[in-house]
Amino acid sequence: MTFSASVAELVSDGERSVSFEFFPPKTDVGEANLWRAIRDLEPLAPTFVSVTYGAGGSTRDRTVRLTGRIATETSLLPVGHLTCVGATDVELLEVVRAYREAGVNHVLALRGDPDGGPGAPWSSHPGGLEHADDLVRLIRSEGDFTVGVAAFPEGHPEATSLADDAKVLLAKQEAGADFAITQFFFHPDDYFRLVERAAAMGADLPIIPGIMPVTNVSQIQRFAQLAGAAFPADVADRFHSVGDDPQAVIELGVEVAAQMCQALLDGGAPGLHFYTLNRSTSTLRVHELLGLGDLPA
């Protein structure tokens, strides 16, 4: 399907972006389940959807194939993911060209986590790229791509300071990035401070906040630790108070996410990006509570 405007153009024109992110399945059964979630969310007409890479690029082929399938079999605009991990620059170019051949012209350019996982020392792959801004330049060298990048409300775990982290975001913009999506977080003020830091450095690309509705307390704590994000004590206490009731955790997760999303939109955020964990129910509930549109009858 052909789209007349890019994500960056839509947001810059004042459109409110609502998007969904999915994790790549490892099996055919998981892929079938993911496809059902995609179809459940398609009637909401999101601005775009994306499918991530597995750790170390381990699901590269499946991710590229799924993203291309979204481009050809649905009404959705897909954003392909690409990381520097475990690939030479020649291999990265092959992936970019595979996306283009599949009809995908939006790519999210990420450095990726070190081979040893978050917290391990980073070293580039032999013949590969060192930083996300290098990857942005490589993608842009291949033609008419819209390129997104990551941003970090609490700062990247490896950043020496929040100011240095904002400089890195500016470097990505100067390399050709058109928009950014943040890591998930739990306090709206963290997002607004990021936008202020970026603007002070001269980075004015649209920054879309990333939201992960809590559905499992231990899981979200693990994700937060891996991502270098805080699961704040005031938020954690609310979830631990209902931790013995899985359904109550889900209900509270929807409530907390909806409240945060409303505060973000009221404060001028250009949209919302939902990390769905390949489950549509909580995202659909938050979407409905915000009055962003209901599913067709």
Image (cartoon, rainbow, N blue to C red):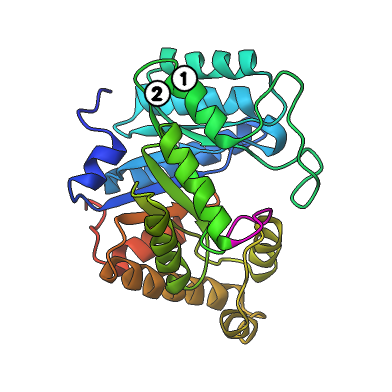
Visible residue check, residue 258: yes
Looking at the picture, which amino acid does disc 1 mark? Tyr
Q: Is residue 27 magenta?
A: no
From this viewpoint, which residue is outermost toward the front?
Answer: 201
Please give the residue where the numbered disc 1 appears in the rendered image: 99
Q: Residue at x 42, y 58 (%)?
A: 283
Q: Residue at x 69, y 42 (%)?
A: 113
Looking at the picture, which amino acid does disc 2 mark? Val
Q: N-terminal of the two: label 2 or label 1? A: 1
Pinpoint residue 15: horizontal percent, then vertical percent: 20, 49
Q: How many marks?
A: 2
- Label 1 CA crowd tier, 10 Å (few <14, some 14–19, many 20+): many
The answer to whether 245 appears left or right of 47 in the picture is right
| Residues in magenta, as a range | 155-161
Q: Which of the numbered marks, if any, corresponds to residue 213?
A: none
Quarter of the image where the N terminus is located: top left
The answer to whether 197 appears left or right of 25 in the picture is left
Contact (Cβ within 8 Å) of mark 2 with mark 1? yes
Pinpoint residue 165: horizontal percent, then vertical percent: 56, 54
- Rendered position, 230 above or below 201: below
Q: Secondary structure at mark 2?
A: loop
Separation of marks 2 and 1 at Cα, in angstroms: 5 Å
Visible residue check, residue 279: no
- Label 2 CA crowd tier, 10 Å (few <14, some 14–19, many 20+): many
- Rendered position, 12 above or below 165: above
Please give the residue where the numbered disc 2 appears in the rendered image: 104
The answer to whether 127 appears left or right of 271 in the picture is right
Pinpoint residue 131: horizontal percent, then vertical percent: 61, 35
Pinpoint residue 296: horizontal percent, then vertical percent: 22, 51
Q: Secondary structure at mark 1?
A: helix
